[in-house]
Image (spheres, rainbow, N blue to C red):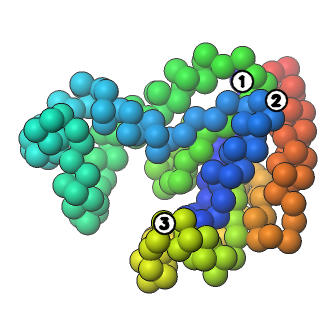
Amino acid sequence: MLKVGITGGIGSGKSTVCQIFAQLGIPIFNADQAVKDLYANHSGLKVKLQSAFGSEVYTTDNQINIPFLKGLFASPEKTEKLNKIVHPLVFQAFFDWAEQQKTPYVVKEAAILFESGADKTVDLTIGVIAPEEIRIQRVKQRDNRSSEEIQSIITKQLTNNELRKKCNYIIENDGTQSLIEQVRDLHAQLLHESAHFRS
């Protein structure tokens, strides 16, 4: 089965693109949600995290301690340590999920597709891009964050030019082209690719 990764920076519209693929009957694996599910339900992960970072990784009612987790991300060393524990489990969850699907191809939505190494778990990649000012406006309306906070997140993510170089396909979400038409065209291309992939 053909595995397709979709990524894009904050406010680019990758989730909207994935919703359109879903409406076309394509199953979507959301990597961010998968991480949350693992934190909540994977007992082996809990043991590993507490061994690596201490018991305060989880709250007294057995929930992941979000403020503590955000504190870990302030340290590059601790972030790398955390990622080495979590990412392989997400990769395996994706493979297990993909095995259950019956469609010609599946989509993996991941904000840090390339940064996490998850691009190695898919066959093709799609980058959703939009101008920075449009992305900032979208996120301000959606999340009630300041421009400075959003800008800080954007500077840590891959640029549009980097995504153009890395991805097999690009979807432009700048409001000048129909998003639905772009996804439909790409869907047809991916169905063709999947037939070739299987042969």
Q: Nearer the viewer, residue 70 or 98?
A: 70
Earlier sequence position, callout 1 versus callout 3:
1
Q: Quadrant of residue 2?
A: top right
Q: Give the position of the C terminus as an image quadrant.
A: top right
Which type of secondary structure does the marked residue at label 2 adopt?
A: helix
Q: Which mark is residue 39?
A: none
Residue under the image location 54 percent in, 40 percent down: 30
Q: How many marks?
A: 3
The image shows residue 95, relative to residue 22, as above or below, that is above
Which type of secondary structure does the marked residue at label 3 adopt?
A: helix
The Cα–Cα distance between marks 1 and 3, rounded to whole angstroms, is 36 Å
Residue under the image location 68 percent in, 52 percent down: 16
Residue under the image location 33 percent in, 43 percent down: 84
- Pointer 2 residue: 194
Q: Quadrant of residue 142?
A: bottom right
The image position of residue 119, as x and y in percent, is 58, 45
- Marks 1 and 2: in contact by CB < 8 Å? yes
Which type of secondary structure does the marked residue at label 1 adopt?
A: loop
- Viewer-nearest of discs 3 and 2: 3
The image position of residue 167, as x and y in percent, is 70, 55
Whether residue 88 sits left or right of residue 67 in the image: it is right
Whether residue 133 sits left or right of residue 184 in the image: it is left
Q: Amino acid at mark 2?
A: Ser
- Badge 2: how crowded within 10 Å, few (<14), some, or many (20+)? some
Q: Which mark is residue 1?
A: 1
Residue 48 can be seen, yes or no: no
